Amino acid sequence: MAQVYNWQLGREMDYPYEEHHPDHQFAFVFNTNRCIACQTCTMACKSTWTFSKGQELMWWNNVETKPYGGYPQNWDSKILKLLDEAHSRAGEDMAWGGKKGEKAPYGQYKGMTIFEAAKRSLNPVTQQRVLGYLPTESEWTAPNIFEDNATPYEGGPFGLSKDGASLPEHKTWFFYLQRICNHCTYPGCLAACPRKAIYKRPEDGIVLIDQERCRGYRRCVEACPYKKAMYRPSTRLSEKCVGCYPRIEGKDPQCGGAPMETRCMTSCVGQIRMQGLVKTNKDGSWAEDRKSPLYYLIKVAKVALPLYPQFGTEPNGYYIPPRWVPRDYLKQMFGPGVDQAIDTYTVPDRELLAVLQLFRKDQRIIFSYEIEPGEKRFETTIRGKKFELFNDTVIAFGKDRQELFRTTVEEPFHVRPDKHANSI
Ligand code: SF4
Ligand code: SF4
Ligand code: SF4
């Protein structure tokens, strides 16, 4: 295996192929605090790409209620269990440690990734290159199982809470986890494919399955730790999220040639999603791009974190974690950056508050932003920290620096004229 650098783990790791990085990388941020589980994103993808015969159980986008929900069922607890067993056999720990720095923003992951665990226990019969499992058919049914089911309430009589609920953590909790393919930097699906049918596009890092080369061996389904490669029985081929690449290329008739965010992103009712293209250096590190909203949220403010970074695929989907969920659970899911991310999000500074207004005001991809200072409107203390609200204006720019829109931190207040029958 080759040695590649995974910045989310803060170290080199084993991967079957040498490093090759795209010029830009498809990436996105989901704010779990805002999602209402309306499933509009799920249906937007379904009605665009997977409505044909054999695609009934393909939900390239899904929104699951954690901790019990999952599509396929128990996908994350199953792969975590396999990793845990591999560590127990090796007498090792899935721990994080070491110093944080520019090349290791979350410190260093000391445990094994899904590639390293497979290498250490390489089975000469199956030659499994990536630790994984194939879900059963029944696990691919009921994509919305356990929706809105909370953890049990351990309270007083009649299930009524004597203390109510308050931050930082609630005794009874659930939250919505939005999921699409992460268009990983080191995809498990690509590593496992014996036909070399899976590739990353050099222009945007979108991961695709070549339908001509695929023979439906389902190694990708087995190896994707997020279970986002799916098998279509009617064609006997595997398929996956295509990152809505015609929209990224500016070929959607609606966008007049400008790169446009994907269908699941632009349909988001809760305005929780932002997708874009981040500039990458030749070595795969992110080029400094201080005014890109994704760069700012992920690399500067560090409020958005990768999903299960310990798997080792360097996923390009990032999540602002939910504030009310027990921290141990969140740290297992999003890594050691959780405390800092939640503290920063709960008491946002002036720039973060402005950047958060950029979510879902336009369908075109935002490449950069600028902030015009506005008046101070409000000041208070939140959890011991000073918070000030300025009514700044944030301006979003597209690929060629054309202005896409401008919006303010305070929502504008409109009063309908009397001539409308339902005016108050
Ligand atoms: S999320 Fe899964 S299917 Fe998508 S690129 Fe990563 S390994 Fe492949
Ligand atoms: S990016 Fe496009 S193809 Fe992928 S889940 Fe979203 S809508 Fe579906
Ligand atoms: S459309 Fe947005 S708010 Fe609705 S379920 Fe999807 S991510 Fe959540």
Image (cartoon, rainbow, N blue to C red):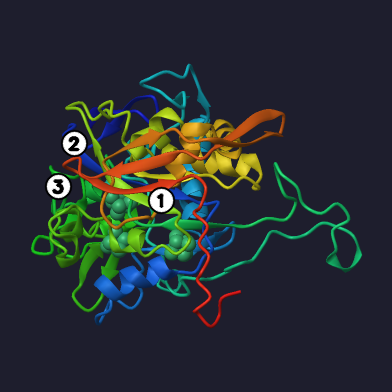
Q: Residue at x 63, y 57 (%)?
A: 174
- Image disc number at residue 252: none
Q: Which residue is mark 2?
A: 17
Tell me whether the residue at label 3 lies in contact with that at label 2, contact meaning CB atoms closer than 8 angstroms. no
Please tell me which residue is depicted at 13% across the width and 60% down the height of the picture: 251
Q: Earlier in the sequence, mark 2 or mark 1?
A: 2
Q: Is residue 111 above or below residue 160?
A: above
Q: Work out whether 85 lies above or below 272.
A: above
- Name the quadrant of the C terminus: bottom right
Report the mark closest to the observer, 2 or 1: 1
Pick whichever, 401 or 19, lies toward us.
401
State the separation of the CA atoms marked 3 and 1: 26 Å
Measuring from the top left, give residue 191's x and y in whole percent. Answer: 23, 45
Q: Amino acid at mark 3?
A: Arg
Q: Alpha-carbon neighbours of circle 3 within 10 Å: few (<14), some, or many (≥20)? A: some
Query: Which badge, 3 or 1, comes first in the chain's sequence?
Result: 3
Q: Nearer the viewer, residue 98 or 384?
A: 384
Which residue is at the front of the view, 88 or 138? 138
Judge whether 413 appears above or below 396 on screen: below
Q: Residue furthest right?
A: 157
Q: Residue under circle 1?
A: 359
Helix, strand or loop at label 2? It is loop
